[in-house]
Image: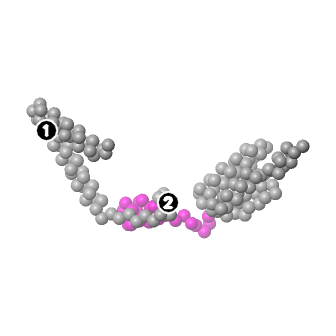
Amino acid sequence: MVPGFLFLAILIAILLGAINYNNNAGFILVFLLGSMALISIFHSFKNLVGIEIRYQPGHSINRISWKALSRGRGLFIKDFTAEDSPCVMLDFDVIPGKDMEFKLSRLCDMILTAEGRQMEYGLRLPGFVKNPARGKSHQHHCLKALALFNLQDKLKGDAP
């Protein structure tokens, strides 16, 4: 049920109780709460009239400059494309430890994090190098390289 209708139903129930028991405090409560609700609706409408939010699909809602919008400056989209954007090279041999699965899962996490932050990243595995770039296609190629890493050696080891 919508909260506004629930509030109205409660007010009507209190009003009926006040009428039935001839209770002046009930009347005061109903009319006080009802008038406060109407005044709140009026002031909310007055504050919100004329506000237009132009949102274009494709922009992340997290990138809207809410401070500028609240100050009445209009809708601005934060753009974080800087010339000196960080570029990282994710290297299999640099990750500490001897467990290959741990290293691969750590690289997978690094790739997903870098892509989420829209950083340029490259991948270096033994026998495979992917130059730094970004985007879903680049992410797909890097994750595919991780998934297929050392697969030929495993298949040869299983053969009789």
Mark 2 closeness class: few <14, some 14–19, many ≥20 residues within 10 Å: few
Q: Which residues are magenta?
A: 64-91
Q: Which mark is residue 62?
A: none
SS state under label 2? loop
Mark 2 or 1, nearer chain start: 1
Residue visible at 28% across and 59% down? 47
Q: Please, what is the three-letter code of the amino acid marked with disc 1?
A: Phe
Identify the amino acid type marked 2.
Ser
Residue linked to disc 2: 60
The answer to which of 52 and 120 lies nearer the viewer is 52
The secondary structure making up most of the magenta span is: loop
Where is residue 151? Give x, y as percent.
80, 50
The answer to whether residue 38 of the structure is visible from this angle is yes
Q: Secondary structure at mark 1?
A: helix
Q: Position of residue 73 (x, y in %)?
A: 38, 66
Position of residue 13 relative to residue 126, above or below, is above
* 59 magenta-colored: no
Q: Residue furthest left?
A: 22
Q: Are marks 2 and 1 in contact (CB under 8 Å)?
A: no
